[in-house]
Amino acid sequence: MSHVIAICGMMGSGKSTAVAHLLKSTPDCVAFHEDEYNPALKQSIEEVQAWWERGAPVGEIDLSTLAAELQEASENFDGVVLLETQFGRLHPNLRPLIDLQCWIDVEPDIALARKIAQLATQFAESPESASSVAPLHWLAEFCKSYFQTTRKLFVRQRNDVSGQSDIVIGGDRSPADVCEQVRIAVPGLFRKAA
């Protein structure tokens, strides 16, 4: 039986970096990434806005496959199961599976700047994007939607998800510092790689 540790934060908070760092430095550790299962990430800005106008019901996002795979891992894997997630215990399918929840806290403007930098780098390095202005148009729409939905979601996550977290870590720290804070919160659970 394993322990499921949710690493939560808004996009751009450093969740992916922290999880990658923990995986690299910890034996007997496996990770699940909510973004790989979340169908909402494929929705248009208009669909996301409509979801927000319905009250942004987190349970409406179908994460049943993630929950099933997480349940199986928690029962059959002997080690630490990391869950990189925006919603953590706020999502009804994930809530009963999480043993410890960590919120990586950053200011929304820092999260936005990090995400734009990440996307711009991806677009710049993509051969398909090199001869197209489409990624720039997409990035412009992403920035325009920030005030309509993304910032509101950031505020909700910061209030609701962090409020359900066992530990809160400042996301302005280095990935190594963030990982060390997680290790301190659960002494004896993580073994460092030799």
Image: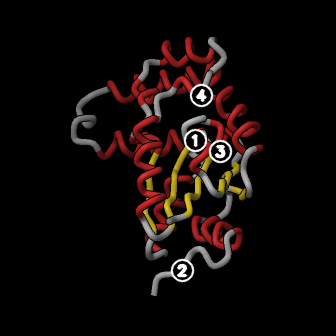
- The residues bearing labels 3 and 1 have C-alpha atoms spaced at a distance of 16 Å
Mark 2 or mark 1: which is in front?
Answer: 2
Specify the amino acid type for callout 4: Val
Task: Please tell me the numbered disc located at residue 191.
Answer: 2
Alpha-carbon span between mark 2 and mark 4: 34 Å
- Kindly report which numbered mark, 3 or 2, lies closer to the viewer in this rendering: 2
Q: Are marks 3 and 4 in contact (CB under 8 Å)?
A: no
Percent across and percent down for residue 178 are 64, 65
Q: Say above or below: 62 vs 96.
A: above
For residue 121, the mark is none
Whole-angstrom CA distance, mark 3 to mark 2, is: 31 Å
Q: Upstream in the sequence, badge 4 or badge 1?
A: 4
| Residue type pointed to by label 2 | Arg
**Residue at the spot of label 4:** 58
Q: Are marks 2 and 4 in contact (CB under 8 Å)?
A: no
**What residue do we see at 44% from left, 18% from top?**
44
The amino acid sitting under disc 1 is: Gln
The residue at which mark 1 appears reads as 86
Residue 148 position by quadrant: top right
Q: x, y percentage for residue 78?
A: 45, 70
Name the front one of labels 4 and 1.
4
Residue at image position (60%, 36%) is: 91
- Name the mark on residue 110: 3
Circles 3, 1 touching at the beta carbon (< 8 Å): no
Packing grade of label 4 (10 A; few <14, some 14-19, many >=20) is some
Q: CA distance from mark 2 to mark 1?
A: 26 Å
Name which quarter of the figure residue 52 lies in: top right
Q: Which of the two discs, 2 and 1, labels the residue nearer the N terminus?
A: 1
